[in-house]
Image (spheres, rainbow, N blue to C red):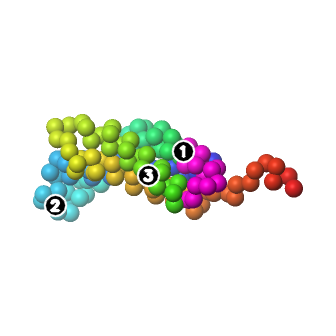
Amino acid sequence: MKRYIIFAAIGPFIAGFLLLLANTYQSGYWTETNSGEVAKLFAVFLKSLQYNYLFGIVPALMLGAIDDILMHVRRVAPVVRMLIVAALAFTGTALMYASHGSESGPTQFILYGLVGFIPATLTSWLAHKYAEELYQPAAAAQH
């Protein structure tokens, strides 16, 4: 249960911020940056935070479920599990966001792929660090 809470609480927060950064970079907003512009960016992020959770909690929980399933496969090491979950998140977000808009290409594909890759890697690592109990099959736990 802790694993799903980690994915649901942290994933949409980080992904929403990274999506805002990717969109502002794509729009050319970062050409002339000062402290006032950065303050506006954080104000927009705080105002849109509720929507980040509204639209991001289901994909985050889906990645948490994949991470949970892979945790029960003994042959999959934690680092490999993190990379599998991150690769799925990268592919999903890149395909979902990169093909929209007036421009599409490798820069957009990588930028929007990182929107899924970074939170998935971080939440999978945190779940491994703080939410994993030692998995014991039911037959072994009785002895």
Residue lying at the far front in this picture: please name it.
75
Q: Residue furthest left?
A: 32
**Residue at the image position 81 percent from the left and 54 percent from the top:** 140
Say whether residue 138 is visible: yes
Q: Residue at label 1?
A: 66
Q: Nearer the viewer, residue 1 or 77?
A: 77
In percent of width and height, residue 81 lies at 53, 54
Q: Which residue is mark 2?
A: 33
Q: Amino acid at mark 1?
A: Ile
Q: Find residue 43 and report its horizontal and vertical position in percent.
A: 29, 51
Label 2 crowd (10 A; few <14 / some 14-19 / many >=20): few
Query: Between marks 3 and 2, how big is the CA–CA gap?
Result: 31 Å
- Residue 15 bears which disc, if any? none
The residue labelled by disc 3 is 86
C-alpha gap between disc 1 and disc 3: 11 Å
Q: Nearer the viewer, mark 1 or mark 2?
A: 1
Name the residue: 64% across, 54% down: 74
Magenta highlight range: 65-78
Is 66 included in the stretch rendered in magenta?
yes
Separation of residues labelled 1 and 2 (CA atoms) = 39 Å
